[in-house]
């Protein structure tokens, strides 16, 4: 492929868990990738294997500030920059709000200036603590705007509103993906999310911390499946939000039992009070993704979680 015809993609949050996997997929599809991350929650180790790749260029920058790129042609802007775990957005509430508002505005401005398609990484948290189950894209959500999780939920809801405004007013080609719980290699060990928390506790032989009575549910999607859905949506001509996740639902207690079984740990379960506004249920309705993208998850829970445990086992050895 000639350099002139080679697609150029910008990825914000490119050193994060999802941003780094997305970068790998884009490079595998013969894209040139301009990666942007201020490394506030991203990890340089996630992109270390790309050093020296002539199709990859990394820029350390906070996208809540203006984004200037001299390239005349950019084809895709993937906006994935944001703190994305409860620990992150409780410790970084203002940056979380700013990257959802100012960062989205700047990334949309870049897409508008370059005539690029814009792909927003939104979240199932836009549904809040849902009163509808499973969650479909036409559900407007049940969100506490002033609760501790509101900085993330409302930042993403605002980002969606701004994305649709740019689509309708400026005729920008935009896509919105609502990401449900995703797991896999490159998750941070201590980011507060349930998958790394349970696995790291199990591998250390410590009790697994379950909040509430463990009856709240989550649906876990392996990262390669999610990235496949993101790529398909980016290449589509569909503009409404699309849920991407695995509809296989399990309780947190069931998940803890599975981690104990698969790791072979002697860990027990320790129960603690449920955090404020923690969603009681979370399960995507992926009918739209199946119909529009021909996409559904393929990696089984057993296969995906085994790969993830292996990654964390190796990470803990090198820690």
Image (spheres, rainbow, N blue to C red):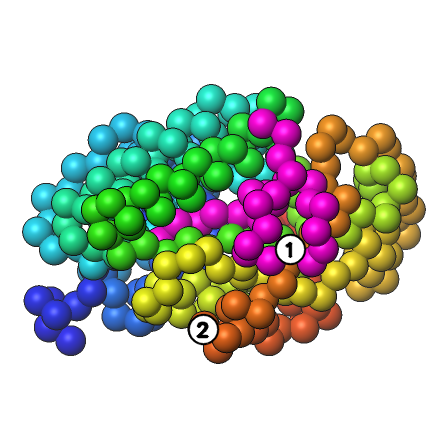
Q: Position of residue 114 (x, y in %)?
A: 14, 50
Residue that numbered label 2 is attached to = 293
Tell me, yes or no, whether the highlighted magenta stretch contains residue 129: yes
Q: What SS does tag 1 mark?
A: loop
Q: Residue at x 81, y 54 (%)?
A: 251
Question: Does 61 sit above or below residue 125?
Answer: above
Which is nearer the eye, 98 or 239? 239
Q: Residue at x 20, y 65 (%)?
A: 7
Instruction: Tell me the number on the disc at residue 135.
Output: 1
Residue 20 in sight: no
Q: Please tell me in which quadrant of the rendered image residue 270 appears.
A: top right
- Structural distance between the alpha carbons of marks 1 and 2: 18 Å
Q: Residue at x 45, y 72 (%)?
A: 292
Contact (Cβ within 8 Å) of mark 1 with mark 2: no
Residue stretch in magenta: 119-145
Pair 1/2: label in front:
1
Q: Position of residue 23 (x, y in %)?
A: 36, 58
């Amino acid at each position: 492929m000639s350099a002139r015809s080679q697609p150029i993609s910008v990825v914000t949050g490119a050193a994060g868990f999802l941003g780094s996997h997305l970068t790998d997929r884009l490079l595998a599809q013969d894209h040139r990738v301009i990666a942007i991350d201020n490394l506030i929650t991203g990890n340089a180790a996630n992109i270390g294997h790309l050093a020296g790749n002539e199709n990859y260029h990394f820029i350390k920058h906070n996208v809540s500030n203006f984004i200037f790129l001299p390239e005349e042609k950019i084809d895709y802007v993937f906006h994935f920059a944001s703190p994305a775990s409860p620990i992150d957005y409780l410790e970084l509430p203002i940056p979380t709000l700013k990257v959802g508002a100012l960062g989205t505005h700047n990334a949309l401005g870049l897409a508008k200036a370059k005539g690029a398609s814009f792909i927003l990484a939104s979240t199932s948290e836009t549904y809040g603590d849902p009163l509808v189950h499973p969650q479909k894209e036409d559900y407007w959500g049940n969100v506490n705007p002033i609760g501790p999780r509101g900085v993330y939920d409302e930042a993403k809801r605002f980002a969606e509103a701004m994305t649709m405004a740019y689509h309708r007013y400026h005729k920008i080609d935009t896509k919105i993906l609502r990401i449900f719980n995703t797991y896999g290699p490159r998750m941070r060990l201590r980011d507060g999310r349930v998958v790394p928390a349970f696995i790291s506790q199990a591998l250390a032989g410590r009790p697994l911390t379950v909040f509430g009575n463990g009856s709240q549910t989550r649906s876990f999607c392996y990262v390669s499946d999610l990235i496949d859905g993101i790529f398909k949506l980016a290449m589509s001509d569909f503009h409404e939000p699309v849920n991407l996740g695995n509809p296989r639902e399990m309780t947190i207690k069931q998940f803890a039992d599975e981690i104990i079984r698969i790791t072979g740990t002697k860990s027990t379960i320790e129960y603690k009070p449920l955090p404020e506004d923690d969603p009681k249920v979370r399960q995507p309705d992926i009918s739209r993704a199946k119909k529009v993208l021909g996409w559904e998850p393929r990696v089984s829970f057993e296969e995906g979680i085994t790969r993830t445990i292996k990654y964390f086992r190796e990470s803990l050895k090198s820690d």
